[in-house]
Image (cartoon, grey):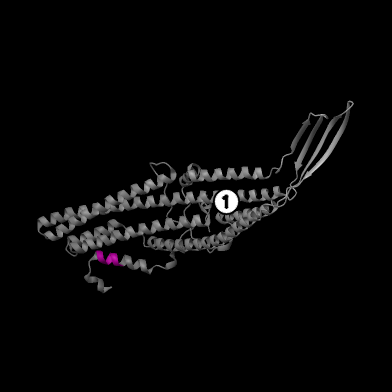
Amino acid sequence: MHIFNKWPPAMVVWLLGIASLSALPVNAAQELSTGTPPDPALRELVRESENENPGVQAARAAMDVGMARSEAASRPLYNPELELDAENADDNTVFVGIGQTIDWSNKRGARRQAAGSEQDALRAEFEVVRQEIAGELLTALGSYHSAVSGQELAKRRSDLMQRFTDLADKRWQAGDINQVELDLARLASTQAQLQEARAAADVVAAEQALAAVLGERRMRWPDLPEDLPAIDDFDVDVLLADLPIMRAKRARVAAMRNTVTLRDRERRADPTISVRGGREDLEGSKEETLVGINLSIPLFVRNNFRAEVAAANAELIRAEREGQDLHRRTRSRLLSAAERYRLSRGAWAIWQRTGQPSIDRQVNLLERAWRVGELSTTDYLVQIDQTLDTRAEALAVRSRLWESWFDWLVASALIDQWLAGDTPR
């Protein structure tokens, strides 16, 4: 350690802090707790956004449409027909008949199955939309809190630079520093003020994005926990099978398969049977009772509806291929989200293990070294920037931690479980 004897105390403190960062184990995140449960106000905010968001309302309306279609598909295909025939001629004839077309190939069953699968898909898609809106809200909330922390740090930097400029002006008047160093201090203060203005604009933009998701602005937004749970090893295929987005796609494929069956059954003609009864007035005031049975069958000669079956088969093949593609993409998204979260959590754990050294303590050390002449104005500014930039990088790590955590919750459809206070794993 004798090599540090010639260096300023502030530099020694800063280097030791960096060394402590690199000395920590990479898997330090595994040593954290299982995470802090989310604020109940956060759960309430998410529920409110789900109830008020137009996208969720549209998905809920789509579910109502699916229920109505399912009910309609379960009804009989054909209604009975009433026939009345009267003829006034030499022989007066009156007929009354009733006819019924028979669903011989059970088209109704195929329609009911297709509509039921469609309804299952709409339910699952509602869950997808609801969780995506919740994830969008949480991500926007994380961006807002990160912007607010960035603004606070920018203001801290601006205050420090203004204080440093005032001290530099006094030292210049006393002849301790030259004009170049004074101008350098003033330039650093101006730069800090510009950064503070930009950080304030970032807060406004983040709050507008958050209000756009919720539909209104709030005086205070719920906080987000900084201690998040670890992701244990999981069976990606088991998790994939239960995801709403995959359930929706499977239901869509089932609906298309039932549609193929329906189109094939529609190629089969349904007979119509009618029964007629009446009377006929004959000469000599005589009457004759008439009873008849009629059977009619459509002849699919000009159009055998094979094209409709072929189109339905093509739609089924497309849905199956899309399902395979979705499975691969969703699996990749799950694994990527989990890995990004583990890395972000590990980086955040490193920062937490350093004890998050106080900015005030570091600044006081640097200022003391500068006042006694151990640091030049340039070295002081460089090390102040390094100190504040390290804190800014820690805020960026926390922002990525939140973003990756919410990405994982959406990808794994575990937002409800986490908001309920359980530990998603």
- In this rendering, does residue 176 appear at all? no
Residue 90, above or below 336: above
Decide: few, some or many residues near mark 1? Use Cα within 10 Å; few <14, some 14-19, many ≥20: many
Residue 295, above or below 323: above
Secondary structure under the numbered disc 1 in the rendered image: helix
Give the image location of residue 389, x and y in percent.
30, 60
- In this rendering, does residue 333 appear at all? yes
Q: Amino acid at mark 1?
A: Ala
Query: Is residue 12 magenta-colored?
Result: yes
Magenta-tinted stretch: 10-15
Instruction: Give the residue displayed 27% in from the left and 59% down from the top.
Output: 362
Q: Residue furthest front?
A: 90
Q: Quadrant of the N terminus?
A: bottom left
Q: Which residue is mark 1?
A: 124
Prevailing secondary structure class for the magenta stretch in the rendered image = helix
Query: Is residue 238 magenta-colored?
Result: no
Give 253 or 121, whichever is nearer the viewer.
253
Instruction: Give the residue displayed 60% in from the left and 60% down from the top.
Output: 317
Q: How many marks?
A: 1
Q: Residue furthest top?
A: 285
Give the left or right position of residue 157, taking residue 129 as reference: left
Give the image location of residue 128, x and y in percent.
53, 51
Give the left or right position of residue 112, taking residue 60 as reference: right
